[in-house]
Amino acid sequence: MDPNNAIRPDYTLPEFQGERQQLIDEGLTEQQATRSLTALWNFNNNAEKVRWTARQVLLEEARQRAEEDEAQRLQDLKDEEEATRLEDRKKNKNKYAPIKRGKVPSDPTILPAQYATRRLKAGDYCELHYFTNKGLDEAKVATLIAEPDALVMLPAADGVHSWVPAAAVKDPKAAPVTKDENLTWEEFNEVAPRIISFMKVHDWPDDRVSMHIQFWMALQAHRWRHAPDVLKQKALLLYQSQQRRRWHLTVGTAQGWSLEEINQDLLFEAREELFNEKRDKETAFAVQVSHSSLRSLVKLERSSYPCAFAPSFPPFVYPFLSF
């Protein structure tokens, strides 16, 4: 009971005659006995008030601690649920991907290989082959046969290893990738708008996207693009392959540069490289044909003469006489 609400007794009433009489017997008057009893009650009541107040303070502190503990427990539970939800969203992105309202598109959806997607997302060099019609068809087939839950560990640029889907790693057993310089111009024209679109999807900086657009437009607008000399047309593709790879190797360093403007000297070197390669192949083929013809001639001569009268041949022919 709260002592603050207690009502002080009236010790002048007859029911307190016994208490007053004890004090009167001690030598107090009637009035003194009444005042003494009243003073004693006040003293005890004040002491009870102090104890009551202290007890209420302790109870209030305990109540506040309990409320704080409960609030913290609820917050911890909420944080745990949020962490679980975020982890689930991270692992199952497709589950939480927002739905875009719209009709089913008539155009086929372009889904390159996960390896190419991972390379582009990281801003790394990626062969154009993956964005050709052939590369997209290969990616479609690989998606159907790949194990969706398979993971492999790869080191990141900062040296920290992380698990990535196996499909996002280049499969050494997969069909060989056509090098950029071996693409046809038709395939190159398939690739350019697609890879630019995916650069934007993966948040490549605008200046890099613009540089690639200008670079590829410059190649397509170059006077060699429709030159009668096929080597000149191929030289543009070889130049594209060489310089784009070099750009990725040097970007962010003091040796970096822009691809926008074509270096004519390097383009001529690319054409010369193709010319030398063609000449070497033609020379090797001519030598092979010559050797084959010589063997046939030797066989014919040996079959036309008896052994005793076989004609003699120049020294350089004899290596071909053993069959």
Image (cartoon, helix red, strand yellow):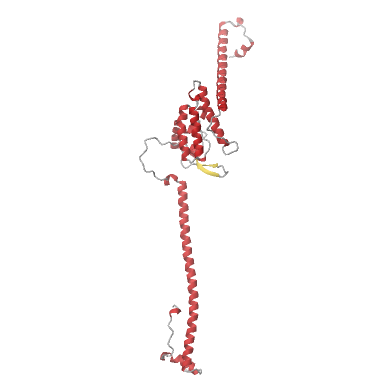
Q: Is residue 153 above or below residue 8?
A: above
- Single out the residue that lies furthest toward the right: 315
Q: Which residue sits at x=46%, y=29%?
A: 187
Residue 266 seen in render: yes
Residue 12: % across, % down: 43, 90
Q: Can you give x and y, in whole percent of width and height, for residue 323 in the image?
A: 58, 14
x%, y% of residue 251? 56, 37
Frontmost residue, 230 versus 317: 230
The answer to whether one can see residue 174 in this image is: no
Residue 78, given in percent of the width and then of the height, sits at 45, 56
* Quadrant housing residue 136: top left
User: For the view shown, which residue lies furthest in the top direction?
Assistant: 309
Looking at the image, residue 6 lies above or below residue 18: above
What residue lies at 49% left-to-right and 69% top-to-bottom? 61
Q: Residue furthest left?
A: 103
Query: Who's the residue at 45% across and 49% down the image?
Result: 88
- Decide: is 239 above or below 284: below
